[in-house]
């Protein structure tokens, strides 16, 4: 009769207790005897099918495959089959605090004015009361450009594209043109019956928006400068912006209306009435010429994005605060927009487009942000607020990873050491 067994039973002669006791008290003279080798082979064959010498008892994953070509054999030990970690999404760091603060006494707390503009020659123009100042960002020098008489306050400033000439709107409805290099007045443009709160250049044509509800186009090359007028708002025009290609003009007003004009037309191509508060903030996207962002006042709080080719609102977001200003990143690949806010949070917000995911909130102003402009290199945003300060934020300073890794830490400066007076 045949029997099958699931156990290996060793040879009884190898399990003699007396011999085992004696062997423990003696040093084994020949550990590699034929009998010992035969016993180990039998254990190997019975328990591990003869594969004990070529495998690890406590290894629970397959051995890494051997290299195809002649490579250092040790690489087999660390070329395991485990998968590599997925690439982590890099998050861009935006400093939470401004890099510089300037005191600006006399900065009027008026939502409808535009008193801050940064030129292509790196000079910041600021209107404080009835005086216009020029702050050179390269040298930190301050120049008093001009002063109006009495209570005829400055209501708007706007640089030409080359950064030498400055247009200054005033409370009496005039626009003054100045040569910033020589600090000389060039001419005064008249035509409005009330203050001029919005200005925008398109080459040699200066467009001005007023509380008298009119938009005037001035050709500054000729004596009779007023070449056309547009009257399609019922209240003050507080936002005015030509597109980068000069083919379309966007206007926003206290009547909650946004109008889009083609360059050669005298009537709006589109009129948008979706906002429920005044529209001052206007910004054309640098990466898509027909994309316009508009921001509404305190009872609206939304940013809307428009396709000015077909008149469609392509996106919108409720920011939760009054929108006073908008600036796109000058880097077309960045596709981010910064919004300046008043009540209730007085902050800057950075948004990714088109997802409209908020990247950062930057707080520092004690009162509402009124004005915003951007440095010529596109790295810094400057804000002017009702707390009578001007702050510089390094928002779009995108560094290469290697540059950031090798950068030396910069000592943190106190606010008092970083604060200067405009006048």
Image (cartoon, grey):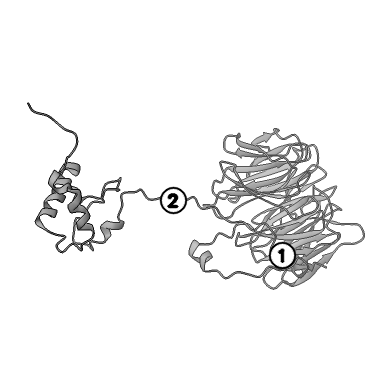
Marks 1 and 2: which is nearer the front?
A: 2
Residue at image mark 2:
87
Q: Earlier in the sequence, mark 1 or mark 2?
A: 2
Nearer the observer, 149 or 332: 332
Residue 324 place in picture, x, y as percent: 74, 47
Q: Is residue 31 visible?
A: yes
Helix, strand, or loop for circle 2?
loop
Query: Is residue 223 at least partly visible in the picture?
Result: no
> Callout 2 environment at 10 Å: few (<14), some (14 to 19), or many (20+)?
few
Q: Position of residue 124 (x, y in %)?
A: 72, 63
- The picture places residue 202, in percent across and down from the top left corner, at 65, 53
In the rendered structure, the answer to whether residue 191 lies left or right of residue 90 reads: right
Q: Determine which quarter of the picture holds residue 49.
A: top left
Is 120 located above or below residue 290 in the figure? below
Front in this rendered view, residue 280 or 19: 19
Residue 395 lies in quadrant? bottom right
Mark number displayed over residue 360: none
The one nearer the camera, 402 or 228, is 402
Work out whether 47 lies above or below 219.
above
């Amino acid at each position: 009769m045949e029997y099958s067994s699931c156990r290996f039973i060793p040879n009884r002669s190898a399990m003699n207790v007396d011999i085992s006791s004696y062997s423990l008290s003696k040093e084994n003279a020949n550990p590699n005897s034929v009998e010992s080798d035969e016993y180990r082979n039998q254990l190997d064959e019975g328990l591990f099918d003869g594969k004990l010498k070529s495998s690890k008892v406590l290894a629970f994953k397959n051995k890494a495959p051997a290299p195809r070509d002649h490579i250092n054999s040790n690489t087999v030990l660390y070329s395991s089959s485990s998968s590599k970690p997925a690439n982590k999404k890099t998050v861009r760091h935006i400093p939470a605090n401004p890099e510089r603060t300037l005191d600006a006494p006399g900065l009027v707390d008026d939502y409808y004015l535009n008193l801050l503009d940064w030129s292509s020659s790196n000079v910041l123009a600021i209107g404080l009361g009835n005086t216009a100042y020029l702050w050179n960002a390269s040298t930190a020098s301050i120049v008093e450009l001009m002063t109006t008489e009495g209570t005829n306050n400055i209501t708007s400033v706007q640089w030409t594209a080359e950064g030498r000439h400055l247009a200054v709107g005033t409370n009496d409805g005039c626009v003054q043109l100045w040569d910033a290099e020589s600090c000389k007045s060039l001419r005064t443009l008249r035509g409005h019956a009330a203050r001029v709160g919005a200005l925008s250049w398109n080459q040699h044509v200066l467009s001005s928006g007023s509380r008298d509800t009119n938009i005037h186009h001035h050709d500054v090359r000729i004596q009779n400068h007023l070449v056309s007028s547009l009257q399609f708002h019922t209240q003050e025009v507080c936002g005015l912006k030509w597109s980068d290609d000069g083919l379309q003009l966007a206007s926003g007003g206290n009547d909650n209306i946004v109008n889009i004009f083609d360059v050669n037309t005298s009537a709006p191509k589109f009129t948008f009435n979706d906002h429920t508060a005044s529209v001052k903030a206007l910004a054309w996207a640098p990466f898509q010429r027909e994309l316009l962002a508009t921001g509404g006042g305190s009872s609206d709080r939304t940013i809307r994005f428009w396709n000015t080719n077909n008149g469609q609102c392509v996106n919108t977001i409720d920011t939760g605060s009054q929108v006073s200003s908008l600036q796109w990143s000058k880097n077309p690949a960045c596709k981010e927009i910064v919004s300046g806010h008043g009540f209730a949070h007085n902050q800057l917000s950075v948004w990714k487009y088109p997802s409209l995911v908020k990247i950062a909130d930057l707080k520092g102003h004690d009162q509402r942000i009124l004005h915003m402009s951007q440095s010529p290199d596109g790295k810094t945003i400057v804000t002017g607020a009702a707390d009578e300060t001007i702050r510089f934020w390094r928002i779009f300073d995108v560094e290469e990873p290697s540059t950031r890794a090798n950068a030396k830490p910069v000592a943190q400066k106190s606010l008092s050491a970083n604060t200067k007076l405009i006048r």
